[in-house]
Image (tube, helix red, strand yellow):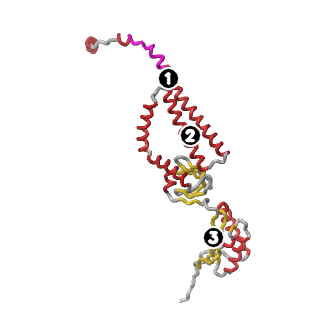
Amino acid sequence: MQDNLLDTMTDTLPIDTGFISTIDFSSYIPMIIGGGIKLLIFIFGLYFGFKAIAKLTTLLKKTLQKQRFDKTLLGFLTSIVSNILKVLLVLSLVTYIGIPTTSFVAILGAAGLAIGMALSGTLQNFAGGAMLLAFRPFKVGDYVELAGYAGTVSEIQIFNTILTTPDNKRIIIPNAECSSSSMINYSSLPKRRVDFTIGIGYNDSIDDAKSVLQNIAESDARVIDKTDITIAVSELAESSVNITFRVWVKSENYWDIKFAFTERIKKEFDKNNISFPYPQHDIHLYNT
């Protein structure tokens, strides 16, 4: 029964193989080969072109560094040059493979509008980077607190600012956050004040403690404005008499003084029998 059905379909729907046999496939072979070659050139052109652009931008960066170009602008400039060269490379290769540039630019424009709406945050980062370079709240090499992180500014790029923490971690912060959030720049001013609060016992001599602290501050050449040293009793606490000790130093010496003085205060107080009390409670027992 199935054989009869197939015979009937063959009789009612005859297959015309004459048209296929008249097609000259050999005429399409050069076009296919030419298109394949152009596609390969496009792929290899992108691959090697991007590598060449990376080497050119690296060479540009080294050249500008030798000429002592502004470090803050350096990363931003090389990033822009890299992206412009990549766009030009793609346009050149697209034109080579036969796509009209005007049509391609129109497509890019429409796609750019859609992508721009989807990536509004990225555009904000670009605008934030421009604001940072225009107003210069910080520069490369400054130690800052930024968007909840602290570190040394190592690079300002088109979309991001890169910090390096004291323990050598790399932090990447979008420029939109950098330009819109509060920040602290510890390096922008030439000097900083180092503050200490030292607690001594109620039985210890306040004058002796002040004399020791004064000698520590005056004997260290890194302390500047020695007439502006502050040593004063700031609080009569529950278990100690708290003395505020403040000195001014160059910004780059802040942590060196902070660590050195903390150790030296302990050693000098020990030599002079000045105690460091700890919280304690007096217990009174009554006979009833």
Query: Which secondary structure, mark 3?
Result: strand
Inter-mark Cα distance, 1 to 2: 29 Å
Give left or right: position of 215 versus 101: right
Q: Can you tell which quarter of the image residue 247 is in? A: bottom right
Instruction: Answer whether labels 3 and 1 touch (C-beta < 8 Å).
Output: no
Label 3 to label 1: alpha-carbon separation: 74 Å
Q: Quadrant of the N terminus?
A: top left
- The three-letter amino acid code for the residue at tag 1 is Gly
SS at circle 1:
helix
Predominant secondary structure, magenta span: helix
Residue 286 seen anywhere in this rendered image of the structure = yes
- Say whether residue 3 is magenta: no
Q: Nearer the viewer, residue 269 or 254?
A: 254
Q: Position of residue 206 (x, y in %)?
A: 67, 80
Q: Is residue 94 left or right of residue 210?
A: left
Q: Residue at x 49, y 19 (%)?
A: 33
Mark 2: amino acid: Ser
User: As rendered, which of 40 and 265 lies closer to the eye?
Assistant: 40
Q: Which residue is mark 2?
A: 82
Q: Is residue 280 visible?
A: no
Residue 131 drawn at (x, y percent) = 51, 52
State the residue position of label 3: 196
- Stretch in magenta: 22-32
| Residue marked by disc 1 | 36
- Label 2 or label 3, whichever comes before in sequence order: 2
Position of residue 205 relative to residue 190, above or below, is below
Type of the residue with mark 3: Phe
**Crowd tier of the residue under label 1, counting other residues whose Cα lies within 10 Å: few below 14, some 14–19, many 20 or above:** few
